[in-house]
Amino acid sequence: MHKADSIGYSTDLCVFFSVQGRVLSAYLKSTGEATMGELALLLAIREAESPVSAEQLADFLFYGIRTVRNMLLSFEDTGLVHKDSNRHDARAFTVALTDEGLAVTDRLASGVYEVLKRCFWKALPEEDFQEVMKSDMRLCLNCVRGCAVNPFGDHSKTVLPIEVDHLVFWRVVKDRWEAIARDRAEISLMEANILHYVCKHDASIISDIAQALISPKSAISLGVKRLREIGLLDKAVCAGDQRSNEIFPTERGVSIDRSLFALLDDETRAFHMGVKDSDLGVIKAWYVRMFANMRRNDCLS
């Protein structure tokens, strides 16, 4: 697949990843058993089947080794994993799930899958997820990483309804987007999306931006204030309503948005380069439907 044919960046895609993350994090918090990052680690150990090292898990999950070791130490304390140390090197060890860890992982994976179905997958066929989305996510991550990681390979072998790759993909893509916004323009990803929205509309008001980005008006107001302070946005009193202000981009804001969007788009297309040509239409259709479901579902209230 040519990069130009891949899936590019949009504020809808960014908002979807953010909203989905908030919904799933809230569900996991309600269980009191794991965060999103911890569930990804448990799912990776679950898929490995045989004992796996912290180094392999860190490479696979795009985590620092210290982060993985800290989570494993916590899981060992709570009885979810057991550790086998190398008798020749006390710092080297492998881990596997205990029976309790296996039960918790399977329960949480099923719960996350049901939340996704209820909140975002209305009118979408589950078989597409099982046959297309699950397999292509591993290939996408391996493309970004540049190689597969043993023992995980190029294809998910999990028997669970959702695999670890989606959790990793959502986090790593957002991390890359945030880094681009910070490094290119010294703004947050939220501020980048505010700027992009305003640049696409002749005149914007806070409530419209908040609705488009599914964010509180207070957060949008703070973002607009910061963008005005650094000269990327400006405001004027609305002609039809003296109590409201219209937001518009400065010339510098338009220039920054253009270059920033190009970088975000290029990175997003690179992240989707593992999608098989035959699956591209299916995944694009899923994104469109999930965007629509996101804006009309009850999980946001």
Image (cartoon, rainbow, N blue to C red):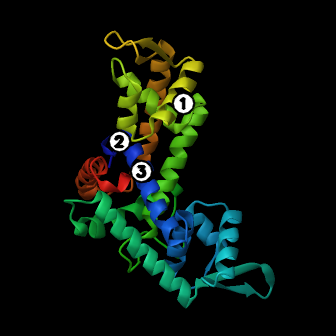
Inter-mark Cα distance, 2 to 1: 21 Å
Three-letter code, disc 2: Asp
Q: Is residue 239 above or below residue 77?
A: above
In the drawing, does residue 90 fall left or right of residue 144? right
Q: Which badge, 2 or 3, comes first in the chain's sequence?
A: 2
* Horizontal and vertical percent position of residue 85: 73, 85
Query: Does residue 250 appear to the left or right of 5 in the view shown?
Result: right
Residue picked out by circle 1: 222
Task: Tell me: residue 245, above or below residue 92.
Answer: above
Which residue was labeled with disc 3?
Answer: 19
Q: 193 or 207, which is in the foreground?
A: 207
Q: CA distance from mark 3 to mark 1?
A: 19 Å
Instruction: Identify the residue at image location x=78%, y=88%.
Output: 87
Q: Position of residue 280 (x, y in %)?
A: 27, 53
Position of residue 12 measured from the top left corner of the image (x, y, whole percent)? 35, 41
Badge 3 marks a residue whose secondary structure is: helix
- Mark number displayed over residue 12: 2
Q: Residue at left 43%, top 47%?
A: 270
- 220 or 275: which is nearer to us? 220
Q: Splitting the image into 4 quarters, where does residue 89 fall?
A: bottom right
Which residue appears farthest toward the front when viewing the image? 243
Q: Residues within 10 Å of mark 2 (few under 14, many from 20)?
A: some
Secondary-structure class at tag 1: helix
